[in-house]
Amino acid sequence: MTTTKSALSEEAIQELEAQIPALAAMATKMAYDRAKQAGHTVVVSKGGFIVAEYADGSERILATCKPKRKVIAGVPFTIGSIPG
C-alpha cells in the first residue's frame, strides 16, 4: 500500500486556519443546543456571573466572575511565559 502526500500551499493553510474560530463557535453552539434539548443543565458565564441554566428554563447563580484580562477578538495575547 502506497500513500501519497499532498502538500498544501501556505495560502491554503492560512485559509483553513482562518476558518477555525467560526467552526469552533459553531461546534460550541451546537453542543449547547444539544445539551439543552436533551434536558441537561448547562453552566454558562452570563453578565459577570457563572449561571446554571436548568432544563425547565430557570437559572441559578453559582458564583460571580470577573475577567482578569479584557480580550479583543482577533488580537493575540500571551498567557504567562514558557521557560526556555
Image (cartoon, rainbow, N blue to C red):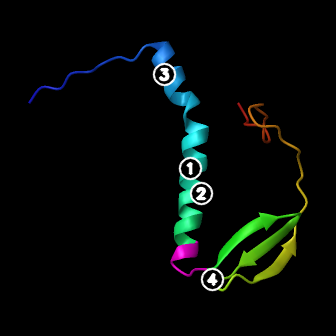
**Residue that badge 3 annotates:** 13
In contact (CB < 8 Å): disc 3 and disc 2: no
The range drawn in magenta is 36-40
* Front-most of residues 84 and 65: 65
- Circle 1 packing at 10 Å, graded few (<14), some (14-19), many (20+), is few
User: Taking 75 as reference, is 12 left or right?
Assistant: left
Q: Which tag, 4 or 1, sits closer to the chain's start?
A: 1
What's the residue type where badge 1 is placed?
A: Met
Report the Cα–Cα distance between label 4 and label 3.
41 Å
In contact (CB < 8 Å): disc 1 and disc 3: no
* Front-most of residues 57 and 17: 57
In contact (CB < 8 Å): disc 2 and disc 1: yes
**Residue that badge 1 annotates:** 26
State how many labels appear. Answer: 4
Report the Cα–Cα distance between label 1 and label 3.
20 Å
Query: Which label belongs to residue 55?
Result: 4
What's the residue type where badge 2 is placed?
A: Lys
Q: Which tag, 4 or 2, sits closer to the chain's start?
A: 2
| x, y percent for residue 8 | 39, 17
Q: Which quadrant of the figure contains the C terminus?
A: top right
Report the Cα–Cα distance between label 4 and label 1.
21 Å
